[in-house]
Image: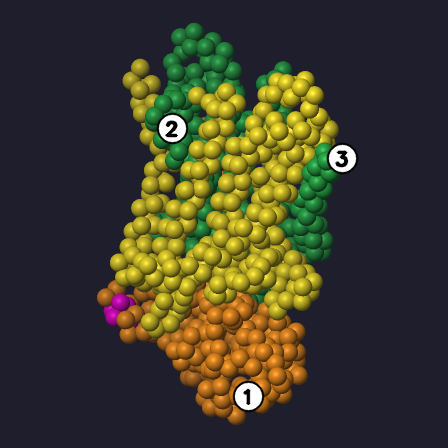
Chain colours: A green, B orange, C yellow
């Protein structure tokens, strides 16, 4: 009897959890779908942000994500390679891991402060794609490292031993043997990080995002509109909340679809890869 | 393989960034009060002249002026005039701020339409918002608790209200802080004891604007400066505006630009030649 | 051989990046806070209830924000811990293999939803709904923000907890069954205690996430500076104060510096939480004989 109640409670909480998340998706889908059209994705905002599309925000988020990965991947991958291939244990590895774990827990608004003080002001990059994506790249660094390391450690030791036995050096082995085998796993991490970078708001408020801009970015020093910030701006500024909320729904739906798509892609790649390793 | 991907990615972005025709960009930064007006005006101007690119950032008056002083923006939007300390900072950086009055803004004190009170004095308003008067009956109204609704501390409207109405008194800590003018009027229209303040343009039929010192807020009383809670909105540039920035400011001050201001609830300024 | 060494050196340098950034963040925050630390009585800063940077003279006290953060953290935990653990146990014990194959990735996708979407949902849907339901003066309050935060962190708790449950060696279970315990007893007495530190880690991490989350509270918690006295009161936690006021504070001013000091406090808070999570997590690996 007792056990029945316990299991029922667990089932109910699972149902509540999934239902509330489903409700969130439902409301955004329901209200967002009526707003979204080809024009919505390709046009600029019009009539004081109460009509038109969100193209500059989509492009801005694209730029931010791409540059974020460009900055964080080399660093993150190197760190993962070091931890997995060169020094998996010991005092130094512990220190590095401690750093990464704690970095992962730092609130995103604190990254925003850091980006503002260091990139925007100290280095004088100003409010720009450069400042924003550098800030975001530090934010996604832990997850790039974690997923890359996981991918590397899933590569069977026999592969390495075979390569080393053939006389290849450590780095040669890593580059020619280990990295190609770990590529799908690393790719998973990259995709997840793109989603993360595209969805973060707090770090870009002070470092990259503007309220309104029509032209495309002219370079890495341009400031941009970004999807998540646009949602916030629509909900907090401006003079016509009703029309703006409708557009914000559209924006939220695009962002939701984008991140869901990216995560699904990552999950699919990972599952395929896991099966491949198992077989 | 990975290298190839990386190289092509870099190449693609490089092409992407350079291929796009470069625009003459004007960056306007500052007061959130001015934001909607600046944005809509920029939009209209860019429609008629696609060669101009204007970026609008919020932040606040202080941030805008600070950016102008350190030459990070072309136009500082402000809902207050430049401070002496900022002027001397500007001098140090060889920036000479030039001011443009772009519109007038007034704050309306609003209550529920059923509230019997029609007029309040400045002192009464100060006492209500600082929490000294807590019931409408103290003012001759119904026996109802006063619910204070305020804008978020970060908003330009709050800043102005604080300066014009509170005179150094602190806002009651029980005030409900709302992030938009719309949210303020929505609460007031649904709660009989509520009082709040919004920009002149946000007064709708759902709420009642009270007279202040017996003067009703209207474009006329704002322009002749008899209504106490009003202020000018400014653009600041480094030296007289040139090129695209000048074109933008000219447009803002044109009849078409001032019409936009009026449509957003600001009071147009008479265009000075 | 030299090339090998050079590459190793390069990689070693890169490996420290995370650590260096962490220190860099701390130094930046500390340097940014310096003006505030010097000019504001720190007792007032930490224990002061008044946060009035716009007044002359300004007051900088963060206690009411701290209380708001704690209260929101508490209310969200009441939502995400039971739901998260329930979901984890459901997936581990009740759901069939087929269901699990679908639920696990679904949970991952849900975990990837950006927080701004939860904030938007809270502001546009949940707030008005709760306002009508409880007849509140405003729908933007602690409850609204807590529900959004609670829902957001359910996937985090349930996926980590489920992982923790599923690495408990099957022999533990078999031994329990052999002693005549039923499924429920085995779960509560054997499997959950064995996975306890993993579960606790997930809860600590979720709590850190809630306390550090900015956009949801900025949009949905109402933003009043007063100390909240009920779940229906509006509140303003630490994170949203930084985000809301950073744009207004002039660079280099005392207000600007005070916001950095709030950042420093947040940083310290999450650092402690992470440290705790890591310690607990390590213990859990040791417990299952997997520690090193």
Q: Main secondary structure of the magenta part?
A: helix
> Which stretch is magenta?
B87-91
For the point 61% across and 48% down, which residue is it?
A: C79
Q: Is residue A67 above or below residue C289?
A: below
Q: Is residue A18 left or right of residue A110?
A: right
Secondary structure state at the residue bearing disc 1: helix
The x, y position of residue C233, in whole percent, is: 56, 63
- Counting the numbered discs, the total is 3
Tag 1 and tag 3, C-beta contact below 8 Å: no
* Residue under pointer 2: A94
Measure the C-alpha gap from mark 1 to mark 3.
64 Å
Looking at the rendered structure, the secondary structure element under dot 3 is loop
Mark 1 vs mark 3: give the one in front.
Answer: 3
From the viewer's perspective, tell me whether residue B152 is left or right of residue B184: left
Neighbourhood count class around disc 3 (C-alpha, 10 Å): few under 14, some 14–19, many 20 upward: few
**Which residue is at the far left?**
B92
Q: Is residue B197 above or below residue B15?
A: below
The residue at 34%/23% (across/down) is: C8
Q: Mark 2 and 1 residues: CB-CB less than 8 Å, in contact?
A: no
Q: Quadrant of residue B217?
A: bottom right
Disc 2 or disc 1, which is closer to the eye? 1
Q: State whether discs 1 and 3 lie on one chain.
A: no
Name the chain under label 1. B
Kindly identify which residue carries mark 3: A1
Q: What mark, if any, has residue B139 been given in the picture?
A: 1
């Amino acid at each position: 009897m007792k056990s029945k109640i316990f299991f029922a409670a667990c089932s109910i909480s699972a149902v509540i959890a999934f239902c509330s998340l489903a409700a969130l998706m439902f409301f955004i889908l329901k209200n967002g779908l009526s707003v979204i059209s080809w024009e919505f994705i390709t046009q600029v905002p019009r009539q004081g942000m109460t009509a038109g599309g969100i193209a500059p925000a989509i492009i801005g988020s694209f730029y931010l994500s791409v540059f974020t990965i460009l900055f964080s991947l080399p660093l993150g991958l190197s760190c993962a390679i070091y931890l997995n291939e060169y020094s998996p244990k010991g005092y130094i590895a512990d220190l590095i891991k401690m750093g990464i774990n704690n970095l992962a827990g730092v609130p995103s608004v604190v990254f925003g402060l850091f980006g503002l003080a260091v990139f925007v002001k100290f280095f004088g990059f100003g409010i720009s794609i450069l400042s924003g994506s550098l800030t975001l790249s530090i934010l996604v660094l832990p997850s790039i490292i974690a997923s890359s390391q996981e991918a590397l450690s899933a590569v069977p030791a026999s592969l390495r031993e075979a390569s080393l036995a053939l006389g290849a050096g450590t780095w040669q082995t890593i580059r020619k043997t280990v990295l190609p085998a770990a590529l799908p796993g690393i790719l998973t991490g990259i995709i997840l990080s793109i989603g993360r970078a595209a969805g973060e708001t707090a770090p870009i408020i002070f470092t990259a995002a503007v309220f309104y801009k029509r032209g495309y970015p002219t370079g890495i020093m341009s400031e941009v509109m970004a999807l998540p910030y646009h949602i916030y701006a629509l909900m907090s500024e401006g003079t016509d909340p009703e029309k703006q909320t409708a557009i914000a729904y559209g924006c939220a739906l695009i962002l939701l679809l984008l991140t869901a798509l990216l995560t699904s892609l990552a999950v699919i790649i990972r599952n395929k890869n896991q099966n491949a390793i198992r077989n | 393989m990975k290298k190839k991907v990386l190289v092509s990615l870099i190449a693609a972005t490089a092409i992407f960034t350079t291929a796009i025709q470069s625009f003459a960009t004007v960056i306007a930064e500052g007061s959130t009060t001015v934001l909607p007006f600046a944005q809509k005006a920029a939009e209209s101007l860019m429609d008629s002249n696609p060669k101009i690119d204007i970026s609008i950032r919020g932040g606040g008056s202080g941030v805008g002026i600070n950016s102008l002083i350190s030459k990070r923006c072309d136009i500082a939007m402000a809902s207050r005039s430049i401070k002496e300390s900022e002027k001397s900072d500007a001098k140090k950086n060889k920036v000479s701020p030039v001011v443009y009055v772009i519109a007038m803004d007034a704050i309306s004190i609003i209550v529920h339409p059923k509230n019997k009170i029609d007029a309040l004095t400045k002192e009464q308003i100060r006492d209500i918002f600082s929490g000294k008067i807590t019931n409408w009956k103290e003012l001759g109204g119904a026996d109802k608790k006063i619910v204070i609704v305020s804008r978020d501390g970060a908003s330009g409207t709050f800043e102005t209200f604080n300066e014009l109405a509170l005179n150094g008194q602190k806002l009651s800590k029980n005030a409900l802080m709302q992030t938009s003018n719309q949210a303020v009027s929505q609460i007031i229209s649904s709660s009989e004891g509520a009082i709040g303040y919004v920009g002149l343009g946000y007064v709708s039929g759902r709420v009642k604007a009270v007279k202040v010192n017996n003067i009703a807020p209207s474009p006329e009383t704002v322009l002749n400066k008899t209504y106490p809670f009003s202020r000018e909105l400014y653009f600041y540039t480094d030296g007289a505006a040139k090129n695209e920035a000048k074109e933008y400011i000219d447009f803002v001050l044109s009849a078409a630009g001032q019409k936009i201001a009026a449509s957003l609830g600001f009071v147009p300024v008479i265009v000075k030649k | 051989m030299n090339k090998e060494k050079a590459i190793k050196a390069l990689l070693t340098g890169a490996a420290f990046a995370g650590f260096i950034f962490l220190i860099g963040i701390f130094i930046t925050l500390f340097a940014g806070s310096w003006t505030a630390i010097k000019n504001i009585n720190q007792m007032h800063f930490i224990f002061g209830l008044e946060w009035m940077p716009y007044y002359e003279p300004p007051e900088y006290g963060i206690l009411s924000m701290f209380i708001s953060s704690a209260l929101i953290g508490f209310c969200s935990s009441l939502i995400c811990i039971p739901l998260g653990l329930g979901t984890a146990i459901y997936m581990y014990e009740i759901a069939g293999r087929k269901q699990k194959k679908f639920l696990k990735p679904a949970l991952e996708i849900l975990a990837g939803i950006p927080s701004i979407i939860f904030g938007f949902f809270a502001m546009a849907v949940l707030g008005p709904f709760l306002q009508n339901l409880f007849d509140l003066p405003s729908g933007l309050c602690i409850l609204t923000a807590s529900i959004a935060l609670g829902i957001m962190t359910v996937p985090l708790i349930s996926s980590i907890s489920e992982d923790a449950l599923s690495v408990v060696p099957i022999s533990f279970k078999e031994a329990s069954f052999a002693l005549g315990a039923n499924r429920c007893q085995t779960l509560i007495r054997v499997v959950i205690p064995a996975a306890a530190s993993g579960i606790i880690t997930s809860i600590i991490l979720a709590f850190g996430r809630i306390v550090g989350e900015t956009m949801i509270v900025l949009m949905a918690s109402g933003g009043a500076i007063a100390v909240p006295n009920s779940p229906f009161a509006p509140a303003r936690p630490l994170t949203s104060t930084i985000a809301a006021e950073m744009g207004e504070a002039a660079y280099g001013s005392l207000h600007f510096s005070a916001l950095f000091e709030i950042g420093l406090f947040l940083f310290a808070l999450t650092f402690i939480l992470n440290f705790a999570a890591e310690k607990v997590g390590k213990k859990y690996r040791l417990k299952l004989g997997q520690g090193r």
